[in-house]
Amino acid sequence: MQTRVTRRGQTVVPASIRKRHAIGAGDRLLWLDEGTTIRVVPLPDDALAALRGCGKGEGLLEKLLQERRAERDRDEQGLRPR
């Protein structure tokens, strides 16, 4: 998809992209200049709510418990300063 930039620096977000990403009037977009490319990222109104569930299926609880066990073992062996 291609759009043009007006003399005032404005452009149009194509309708199919607006629908797919639920972008509406008044929504904020973040422009990331990566040197040779530019990315446009829609910003959610509530960033914390948008992150809800993003770690599902990653086994994060088990990873946390493993790290805690390893930390406890290091403490018991005197390998970690208190």
Image: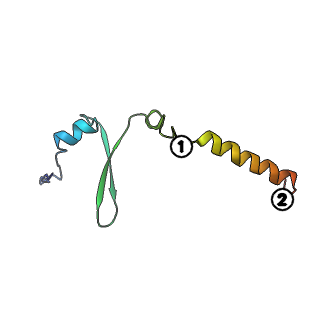
Q: Earlier in the sequence, mark 1 or mark 2?
A: 1
Left or right, 27 with respect to 65, comes to: left
Pair 1/2: label in front: 1
Q: Name above or below for residue 27 compared with residue 41.
A: above
Between 45 and 74, the one lying in front of the other is 74
Give coordinates of residue 25: x percent, y percent: 24, 34
Left or right, 81 with respect to 50, comes to: right
Give coordinates of residue 17: x percent, y percent: 22, 42
Between 44 and 68, the one lying in front of the other is 68
Q: Circle 1: is it few (<14), some (14-19), or many (20+) Cα within 10 Å?
A: few
Question: Which image quarter: residue 74?
Answer: bottom right
Residue at the image point whose x is 29% and y is 58% from the top: 38
Residue at the image point whose x is 31% and y is 41% from the top: 28
Q: Name above or below for residue 58 compared with residue 45.
A: below
Residue at the image point whose x is 13% and y is 51% from the top: 3
How many marks overall? 2
For numbered disc 2, what is the local secondary structure?
A: loop
For numbered disc 1, what is the local secondary structure?
A: loop
Left or right, 22 with respect to 50, comes to: left
Give coordinates of residue 54: x percent, y percent: 47, 39
Residue at the image point whose x is 17% and y is 49% from the top: 10
Between 55 and 34, the one lying in front of the other is 55
Q: Which residue is mark 1?
A: 58
Give coordinates of residue 82: x percent, y percent: 85, 53
Q: Circle 2: is it few (<14), some (14-19), or many (20+) Cα within 10 Å?
A: few
The amino acid marked with disc number 2 is Leu
- Which mark is drawn over residue 78? none
The amino acid marked with disc number 1 is Glu
Marks 1 and 2: CB-CB under 8 Å?
no
What is the spatial separation of the Cα atoms under label 1 and label 2, in whole angstroms?
29 Å
Q: Which residue is mark 2?
A: 79
Between 45 and 81, the one lying in front of the other is 81
